[in-house]
Every structure is written in C-alpha cells, then in structure tokens.
Image (spheres, rainbow, N blue to C red):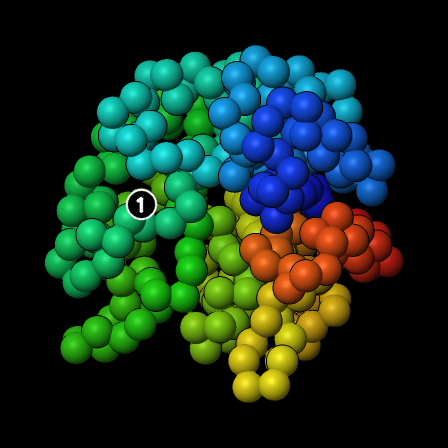
Amino acid sequence: MQIGAQLYTLRMYAQNERDLGRTLEKVSEIGYRTVQISGVGPVAPQRIKALCDDNGLQIVLTHCADDDFLERIDALIERHLLYGCRYVGTGGMPERYRRYGWVDHFAEDFAEPARKLKEAGMLFMYHNHAFEFARQADGRTLMDRLLELMPAELMGVTADTYWLHYAGLDVNDWLQKYADRLHCVHLKDMTPHNFENRMAAVGRGNMNFPAILETLRDNGVTEYALVEQDDCYGESPFDCMRQSYDYLASMGF
C-alpha cells in the first residue's frame, strides 16, 4: 500500500498552473510519491501530467464532475489514459439521488459509464461521506442499496475514514467487511473541539489509526491510501499534510 496526497486538501493553492507547480513541488518535498487530482483549477490535463512527472508524482486517483461520466465518458477515459491512472472517482452522490429509491437511479445512470471504464481497464470509485449510512424505514442504508446495485467489478469505494467514524460506524469492521471494494482509501483523523468534531491530521486525532492501517495493509486489495483534510481550521494545509506524512512514516509507510 502506497501513501499519497489528496490535492483537494491543497485546492486553494492549485487553481492555476503556476500555483499547481509550486504545490506539487512542496508535496514531493514532504515525501509523497502519489497524488489524487481533485479540486484543481482549469489546468490542461497535459500540463497536470507534466507537472506531476517533473516532481516525481504518480497520479493514482481522481474526482471528476458528474457530467464527465454522464456526458463525456470517452474524453474522461482519454484523460485518464494520459495520466496513466486506473481509478476514476466521483466525490460523492449528487444531491438529487440522496433519497431511498433515487439511489436506484444513480446506479442506473452511472452503470454504463462504469462499464465503459471497466472495458478501458479502469474502475469507477465512489467516495463516501456520512449521509449514505443514515438508516431508512426498513433499517437499511443508501450505501447498502448502492453496493447491492453496483457490483464490485463495476464500482470500488474510496472509503473515507473520518466520515465512516462520523456516521457512527466501527471503522475497522466496515473496512474488513468491504475490503474487496477498497482499492483506494482516504485517511483522515477526527478530534473533538468544544462540542463539535473536527478533521485532523492523521495521528493527531483520536481514531485508532494503528488498527486501521493494519487492516488496510493486510487486506491485499488497498493499493493507495491518500491523506485528505478538507478543513485545516486556519493551520497551513501543507503543515497538516506534513504531519500526516510524518506519522505514517513513523508507522512504517
């Protein structure tokens, strides 16, 4: 399992080509060797690839717009062939699908793009938040239904450790149960702040990351564990990314 950087954490510093180059240089200096492209501004794919290559960074996962899947799937595949990236992700389910019954339409709409990705040697990856785990009237969740409708050969899950914990799940139990889906994961810690939960650099919160990392390392499926921190609460996101990297390095990654 390789440790990587989710560029969404650094999105403020990736909105044009010049800043993206500076950001990738800093990411490489920290020690990361793989990245997820997400939250990057309107920079040409050829330039994104060249800047990553210049800094010794491999693109291993993306988050793409819904219309890229539904309206521009051939161009999306070409872009990922350019990147040399197998895992093609969505950042979350569009709001219109977040109802029991309408999740069926999400599966219906995304199944054909997912099949085309599979034919191209790629895999559609779904990134969870917490809402997918709210119990419905029949005791099941949106995630239960989504996984039922989208088989593992068509859809992996970029499991987000913070949101699994936030949803009240046993993180390790869920990671073990659905290991066959977890080609990529997001590593994100949680810490209390007064009466709210906050995101934290990996190892700086209260989640059981020694156990989580052991689970992921031993499952034989997870290839990339990408550090993400959506909100750094005024702290430099580069410092947060370094804190996470240093902790993971101390754990043998």
The residue lying furthest to the left in this view is: 101
Left or right: 183, with 143 as reference point: right
Give the image location of residue 163, x and y in percent. 49, 65
Query: How many other residues sit within 10 Å of disc 1, few (<14), some (14-19) or many (≥20)?
Result: few
**Residue 218 can be seen in this image:** no
Q: How many marks?
A: 1
Left or right: 144, with 2 as reference point: left
Left or right: 189, with 79 as reference point: right
In the rendered view, would you say 181 is above or below 215? above
**Residue 29 can be seen in this image:** yes
Give the image location of residue 37, x and y in percent. 56, 34
- Front residue of 123 and 66: 66
Dot 1: element:
loop
Give the image location of residue 119, x and y in percent. 35, 21
Residue visible at 74% across and 66% down in the picture? 203
Name the residue that disc number 1 marks. Answer: 151
Left or right: 78, with 35 as reference point: left
**Where is residue 26, by image quadrant?**
top right
In the rendered view, would you say 50 is above or below 177? above
Question: Which quadrant does the N terminus fall into?
Answer: top right
Give the image location of residue 70, x and y in percent. 25, 30
In the rendered view, would you say 29 is above or below 81? below
Residue visible at 57% across and 55% down in the picture? 230
- Front residue of 116 and 237: 237
- Front residue of 75 and 25: 25
Residue visible at 78% across and 53% down in the picture? 239
Three-letter amino acid code of the residue under disc 1: Pro
